[in-house]
Amino acid sequence: MKSAMNRRTFVQHSVLASAGAALAAGSLAQPGAAGADGASAPATPSVAQEMPRGKIGDLEISRLLLGGNLLTHYTHSRDLRYVYTLAKAYNTDEKILETLAIAEDHGINTLVVHNVPATLAVLKQHRQRGGKMQWITCTFHALAGGDLRKFATEVEQLVDAGTDALYISGVEADFMCGYTNDISATNSAERATEPKMDVLAQALDLAKAHGLPTGLGAHRLGAIQECEKAGLDIDFYLKTFHHHNYPTANLHYDSNFCPDPEGVTQFMQTVKKPFIAYKVMAAGAIPPKDAFEFAVTNGADFILAGMFDFEIAEDARLVRELYANVERPRPLQA
């Protein structure tokens, strides 16, 4: 005999089921707790202590750094525009605070982020709660247009906010070094305009005047080569670094962030400064194990990775194991 279920009965059952699921989810949503799929296992103090670290100046940072794009809700998702909305809906302020706590539980003590006031406000709240996460921050492309005054103002804002290190963003450095073609274009590695190394040197001086470690980001290898040739006073580099063995590598639409990985591998062997590799997963196109192994074995001193909370435990484990057993032609520089 079929049991009758009218609309009212269905709604009642649905509400009770939803309430139960919400309670279950709430019990799992504590910092360091396992998610429904078991991806984030509870961390122990020994796990955090096992995360290898290096130094940039006097700043000691974990070999795995938390990327800021997902926290600022900016995702490189090709033409899937809904992903931006999805990231924003998932990474609420409270979820960001939870993510920071989980990262610290797994030994990640530093993040890298742009100057986004709303996100910095959440980072301050994390510190007010007792969090120890260090910040490496940059201006939001103020220097790309050559505006030193705006750049200096933003740097001062970041210092006042409590940043632990500064860097000139990849967009700014690329433009200052003459690499103004779109990063996804076939000619992205070609210099399109004359470098403005004098302006870049002034920007570095403005940043370094605050006494914090100061670095430079780049998407194009040529930007780092120009800086090394000019002998600019740079404490560390951030460079996009990933291989091209994934289906959308040649899509030429928000899909390739490192035009010449082989060139990066070879040139960075000559650079005696700390090297933070970013965009190592090509914005999610390359699995973490594959991406991290490529970056570490080919010279990266640190891995910068955008991670949702449920990805942190596994990514931290991979980095711990890689740096413990690494064989690479470029010695660690930090």
Image (cartoon, grey):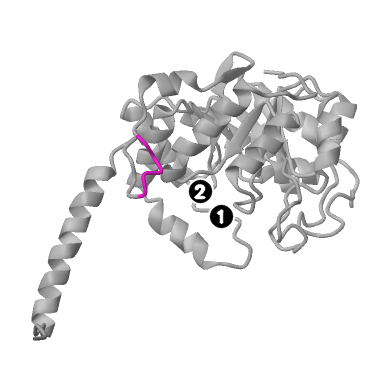
Residue type at the position of mark 2 = Leu
Give yes or no for contact between labels 2 and 1 (Cβ–Cβ under 8 Å): yes
The location of residue 89, given as percent across then percent down, is: 39, 58
Q: Nearer the viewer, residue 257 or 261?
A: 261
* Visible residue check, residue 313: yes
Please tell me whether residue 203 is drawn above or below residue 74 in the rendered image: above
Mark 1, residue position:
75
Question: What span is colored magenta in the figure?
Answer: 37-41
Numbered disc 2: secondary structure: loop
Which picture quadrant has residue 54? top right
Density class for disc 2 (Cα within 10 Å; few <14, some 14-19, many ≥20) is many
The residue depicted at 57 percent of the width and 17 percent of the height is 59
Q: Is residue 328 above or below residue 185?
A: above
Image point 81% across, 29% down: which residue? 268
Magenta stretch: includes residue 169: no
Q: Nearer the viewer, residue 260 or 148?
A: 260
Q: Which structural element holds mark 1?
A: loop
Q: What is the x, y in percent for residue 4?
A: 9, 85
Residue topped by disc 2: 70
Depth check, front residue: 60 or 319:
319
In this rendering, position of residue 61 left or right of residue 309: right
The relative height of residue 251 versus residue 136 in the rendered view (above or below) is: below
Which of the numbered marks, if any, corresponds to residue 90?
Answer: none
- Determine whether 179 is above or below 184 in the image: above
